[in-house]
Image (cartoon, rainbow, N blue to C red):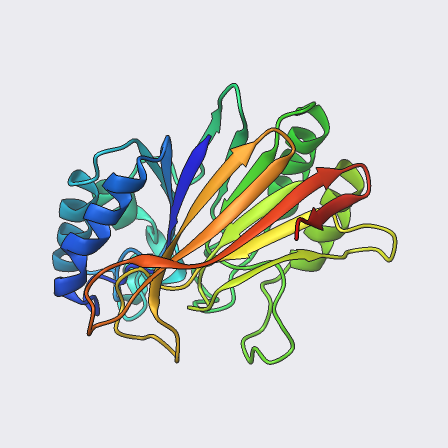
Amino acid sequence: MRLALLTDLHFGRAQPDLVPPLLDSITAASPDLIVIAGDFVQRARASQFRDARAFVDRLQHPWIAVPGNHDIPLFNVIARALAPRAAYRRWIAPDPEPMIETADAVIVGLDTTHRWSHQRGLIRQGQIDRVGKVIRTAQDKPVIIMAHHPFHHRPEVEKKVMKGAADALTYWAACGPHVILSGHLHTWTVEPFVAQKSDAMTLQIHCGTGLSTRLRGEANEYAIIDLDGDQITAQRMTATADTLRFVPESRHSYRQTTTGWHELL
């Protein structure tokens, strides 16, 4: 099974010249499913959601998505209080937590946005329990968790890890191996996270922004993720404003074992 991971498109701060190359590259990759990990827009305005909707309507393959913190209103306090996901549901998808099970994988979407914590996000106990049950009952299928906010940050990241993330990682590690796809930080990271000294059950893949001008020193990028039995490979695809073309940048392969994820060299 092949996935294409997009995140942090940020229409309203997107680079229009990169839209056709990104669409062409995804079409050429021919994924079975495109997964979009939030932040479709910059300020949750209708005009920005309209552009985001036009983008997903041009995708040539099936897709699912979860919202990001920028997809709920920031300055419109009434909308943020009463219906923070209304615009996302109208323009992008009615279900902010989609779940798909195929012959090759189980993909679980999580809405980690929080109306009163614009940047940090939140994972709730009910979500933790639900995903844990999926991991325990998935048998030999890899479980892919998709959320906008990462569950673990590198030491140099200044942003706070979202509330409840540590509890989720500890519980899910006890349930079995799994993969987390996320964005938010506009940086690329592929590595196992060791929740306990004896395991590395969480393989995290953080992808940077597909289209935004807010690059934070990184290139625009998306990921091609191949699932093949107990192996997973993440191919980083990057583009610059000079080239306007997405090309392979790096490749990371891991195997799932009873003791967690181990890199294939």
Q: Residue 137: which quarter of the image?
A: top right
Percent across and percent down for residue 189 are 54, 63
Percent across and percent down for residue 257 are 76, 38
Between residue 236 and residue 136, name the one nearer to us: 236
In this view, the residue farthest toward the top is 103
Left or right side of 151 for 88: left
Q: Residue 18: which quarter of the image?
A: bottom left
Q: Residue at x 25, y 48 (%)?
A: 25
Q: Residue at x 66, y 46 (%)?
A: 125
Q: Residue at x 59, y 53 (%)?
A: 204
Q: Residue at x 55, y 80 (%)?
A: 158
Asked if one can make out residue 45 in the rendered structure from this viewpoint, the answer is yes
Left or right side of 138 for 111: left
Figure check: 44 above or below 89: below
Between residue 84 and residue 13, name the one nearer to us: 13
Q: How many numbered tags mark residues here?
A: 0
Figure check: 155 above or below 57: below
Q: Residue 172: which quarter of the image?
A: top right
Asked if one can make out residue 72 in the rendered structure from this viewpoint, the answer is no
Percent across and percent down for residue 230 are 65, 33
Left or right side of 113 for 238: left
